[in-house]
Image (tube, rainbow, N blue to C red):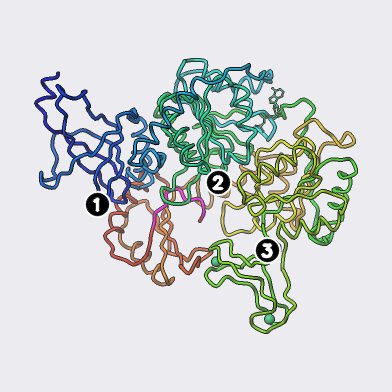
Amino acid sequence: MLGFIKSVEQIILRVALDTPLDTTFDYAWIVPDPDQHPILRPSIGQLVIVPFGRQEVAGIVLAIAEKTDVPPNKLRTVLALRSELSPVSPQWLALCQFAAEYYQRPIGEVALPSLPKNLKALKDVSLRRGLNKLEKLSTAQDSVPAEEPRLNPEQQTAVNAITAKNDFAPFLLFGVTGSGKTEVFLQASAKILAQSDDAQVLILVPEINLTPQFEAHIRARFPGLILATLHSGMAEGERLLHWLSAHTGRARIVLGTRLAMLASLPHLRLIIVDEEHDPSYKQQEGLRYSARDLAVWRARQLAIPVVLGSATPSLESWQSARSGKYHLLELHERAVPDAVLPVVKLINLEREKPSEGLTPRLIDSIRLRLEKGEQSLLFLNRRGYAPVLACDACGWISNCTRCTAHMVMHKGDHRLRCHHCGLEQRIPRHCPTCGNIDLQPLGRGTQRMEESLGAIFPEAKVLRIDADSTRLKGSAAAAFDRVHSGEVDILIGTQMVAKGHDFKHLTLVAALNPDAALFSQDYRASERLFAQLMQVAGRAGRAAKKTDGNPSEVLIQTRYPDHPLYHALMAHDYPSFAADLLEERQQAHMPPFMYQALLRAEAKELSIAIDFLKQAASSLHHVGITINDPIPMTMTRVANVDRAQLLVESVSRPALQAFVKEWITILRAMKSRVRWSVEIDPVDI
Ligand code: ADP
Ligand code: ZN
Ligand code: ZN
């Protein structure tokens, strides 16, 4: 053995680097003399530092080769092996390889960005410090775990099914908010974790900061185990520590947002995706992956169970459950005894005229809650004071000069702000075109509602929660604490307030103006609206609290009280809503019955982008692939860049994959001034 190593002077490492070039790179590793050095041999999955151009960068060893095509005088040498870090597993590399091929990006662009920055940094100091800190963390704490509630029969069936065998099994756990899905996740995890000393469980959530209760539950239930969390809001040092604890297998539970899907987890035995329909599982730039789809792939690869949970599953997952690809697990009832589903009622805006955005009936309902000391939550998915500022005299409106969008009025700091490109200016004192000083805010955002609510209910404590009110770190958590403590009477907010919070004193939820999404050009808008309304409605009546023996109420102000979406909502009937949508989709040949890829182009002028797309459209033809006409994007101009898109479709996923692979090579060769990108399974089109 030793003799063999001695006779080899150098070996070739095939390395992945974070570059847009779709290739791997060969480097030489000079094997040290084993008589003088400890035997140091690189292995596959090892992190290395290599020269690249004039830089020194991190790479991952993909293969060890005997020979290379790189001429000896061009072949550069590996600078360092990060041997204190155990290599990433072949399974993890295979996951990256799959994601790279499926989403049509180089493997280096998948694998390296998913590692913490400090890990890739050239100094070993932070890594060593991280590992030391981890030692301490690993030997900390053990206290008594919180008691598990007794599962109801449906929950028990679900836990049994999920933990039945050590093999690939995809589950869709479908149940209204409060039906006890989280409890199923926790008890299934407990069983899997108890099956071996090293088993790891990965739990994905859309947003960690908005749902601190989940983390608290896990900590209380598994006090002796190390929990790692991974999300984009973490400081680099912290992120490194948590990543390392997952990678070294010390963390037995990893709770994270979509990026945690690409964490290195050597003993992964169960994957859970909570709120699997949530749009945040899809990355919208760079590697545009779907963490939910990768979860299912990874579970198959590792032959382990994966559970997708939702009260309003994505149509993709619902269809997979209907067709038998996924096992459907259903929870029909709310889990807390006595907690009943809130009653959903519509308020017809054509008949009941609102003032300040609130109908008399809604105002009465809020007043009733105030008298009883209960809370109300008003949902309005539009931040700012007013979406537009306008001049009655000449028709001027506050358009953004750089985007196809209005500038939103923010009253508190006297600003007009474009929510798309960030352009800001002071609110003009008079009309920029005609000089009229009487400019009118049109429409209503959360700030304006907050102001109106204060005027209508001067005795009430009103709190607004949206991206503007929670800009400071920790402020969202502080705001939610105020709601939980019961200090707040009326909560007004955007979709931020719809996520997993369990407000015990809340008995009224109202959607002020949800209609816009019914007629959106985006064919997924109604699916999303239904999910949002179900989710926000689910904030009400989670505890067993009742108003005069009546269940909690959800009021929806609408001009379209006959719309089937609202009827399905009143009946709490996701399955029939989904059945209708799926039938529409099938007839219209849309996903999930069709696979899509989207080519986007950006240029200084729309015609340049469109010309590029036309050329792209005629550059390749395959049987079974439909290439649509190039069109401008709905919001054509953002930050002075015009954007257009071209949709490619097929009923066959492999056929589409083959087409796109070949197509990208052609597109790369087309010398063009446009910036373009291809997205597989696009969601925003
Ligand atoms: P979901 O995740 O479906 O919204 P949760 O798991 O958060 O629902 O459960 C809602 C509430 O019901 C929580 O307060 C939880 O503690 C409680 N709960 C869940 N399962 C049970 C059970 N089997 N018995 C009693 N309470 C339960
Ligand atoms: Zn004017
Ligand atoms: Zn703009």
Label ID, residue 545? none
* Magenta residue check for 679: yes
Disc 2 designates what residue? 279
Viewer-proximal residue among 570 and 212: 212
Is 334 situated above or below 423?
Answer: above
Is residue 585 shown left or right of residue 558?
left
Please name the residue shown 67% across and 60% down the image.
384
Q: Are marks 1 and 2 in contact (CB under 8 Å)?
A: no
Viewer-proximal residue among 201 and 2: 2
Disc 1 designates what residue? 54
For marks 1 and 2, the one nearer the N-term is: 1
Is residue 233 shown left or right of residue 379?
left
Give the Cα separation between the discs numbered 1 and 2. Answer: 40 Å
Is 599 situated above or below 212?
Answer: below
Q: In which quadrant of the rendered view does residue 426 lie?
A: bottom right
Q: Start and end of the magenta stretch?
A: 677-684
- Give how far across and how far down residue 4 sits, in percent: 11, 22
Label ID, residue 413? 3
Number of dots carrying numbers: 3
Element at label 1 = loop
Give the Cα separation between the discs numbered 3 and 1. Answer: 47 Å
Give the Cα separation between the discs numbered 2 and 3. Answer: 31 Å
* Magenta residue check for 478: no
